[in-house]
Amino acid sequence: MANSKYEYVKSFELEDELPNLILVRIDGRDFSRFSQVHEFEKPNDEAALNLLNSCSAAVLEEFPDIIFAYGYSDEYSFVFKKTSRFYQRRASKILSLVASFFAAVYPEVLQAYLAWRQQDCHANNQYETCFWMLVKSGMTISEAQELLKDTQKQQKNELLFHKFGINYKTLPELFRQGSCLFKKKIEEKGCVGTILYNDLGHFSKDIGRVEPDFVRSFQFENKLLPLTWVVVRIDGSHFHRFSDVHEFEKPNDEQALKLMNSCAVAVLQEFEDIHFGYGVSDEYSFVLKRESELYQRQSSKIISAIASLFTSTYVIKWGDFFPRKELKYPPSFDGRAVCYPTYKILLDYLAWRQVDCHINNQYNTCFWMLVKSGKTKTQSQDYLKGTQTREKNELLSSQFGIEYNTLPLIFRMGSSVLRSKEAVAVENGVVVSGKKLKREGEVVVDHCNIIERGFWEEHPHILSYS
């Protein structure tokens, strides 16, 4: 990244390397509401489960270090090989990438964990089958819950058989046992168990005696410091390739930037604790209020929820911004959460990102104009090496007739996403003059100078000085 006086803020970023075997579990956020809105079949929707399986298969295909997965209902667990150095084992990067990509396509302790999840699958599915059969027979939700209260496995089986003629053990295994995915080495004659043994290590034979609390004790969780500004920054993973494959305009594709902004607006609309967002190119930073208790300040949940919502929104809204361009493969975004202790340091962080926006955009504008004029990429890089801001401006003006300061603000300033304090004029979500008014509290996009303190003094409602 470009150098600036604000780069000291990087010292607040912490490393979060994971020990031992790595297992990532993702859960659907508010999935009860999602399944109701989309009218999923109760107690199980086979098409919805197969969709989750399809997403998980895509995850295994995308990330070679993931060798096994288990899922049921709205959750999936992904197991990395024990020697994995994927993203150098950084928890936030690994978690956000897996959650993001999943959303886009929608030893003994390890085995104990997987068995525990399958036991949960069975217990939950058995209860849900009884519950929804009772509701469908005419009982209210409260009556069905009361009837099933404290019932054991055998009692539920008898209820299903005698009252509804259902033999629970004959229900599809997809419902009762969940789904496993793994990579099968076709050239090897050994069975799947042998392959998994080689990749994961020793498995316990007496798995049923391992207590869930013992398994939970291995869960890695990083709780963010209280009463600090939390910034979640997400970045496109391998976005150079993504932009090349989808033929984005160089040096800036305005439609691609507006798609990013639309995703950021969706994030602020979904999470009230996020008060501000700033984006440039393929990255976005989201600022949570100091006193936020979102997910009890659990870093993994906050990062994965934001990254997955942003990614899924990107896929859903792709056609709105590129109606004549097919999305050839799903994008993914990695993320991390950083705590900043003071208001000044927070503003310096945001200033750092906007300074980078200016420096990188000015360089890229020069670089791509040189390439389009006939120079190779290597020649263009050599030509620009060591040049300063003034020299780049002169190059653009004298050789290409471009006055840098007249380029669109979205390229030079990046995009700020905030809630309006009062009614403002907007067009397509962007603050403009002489247009229709949006109501107070509406999430809007602006392209403004956030380095100068004057912006924050004029908009004190965005962030608190406390």
Image: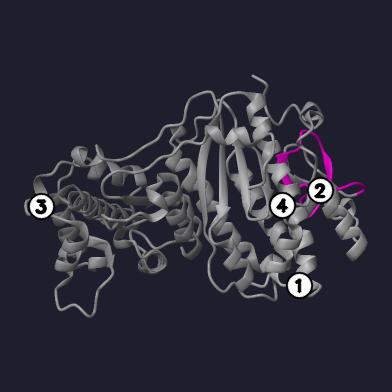
Does label 1 or label 4 sit earlier along the sequence? Answer: 4
Nearer to us: label 1 or label 3: 1
Is there CB contact under 8 Å for labels 4 and 3? no
Instruction: Give how far apart the Cα atoms at labels 4 and 3 are.
Output: 53 Å
Is there CB contact under 8 Å for labels 4 and 2? no
**Residue plotted at (69% across, 38% down):** 4
- Residue 360's disc is 4
- Callout 2 environment at 10 Å: few (<14), some (14 to 19), or many (20+)? few
- Callout 4 environment at 10 Å: few (<14), some (14 to 19), or many (20+)? some
**Residue plotted at (68% across, 39% down):** 352
- Callout 1 environment at 10 Å: few (<14), some (14 to 19), or many (20+)? some
Q: Specify the quadrant of the image occupied by residue 168.
A: bottom left
Residue type for callout 3: Ser
Residue type for callout 4: Asn
**Left or right of residue 453, residue 270 in this image:** left
Query: Which residue has dot 2 on it?
Result: 389
Query: Which residue has dot 3 on it?
Result: 204
Instruction: Give how far apart the Cα atoms at labels 1 and 4 are.
Output: 19 Å
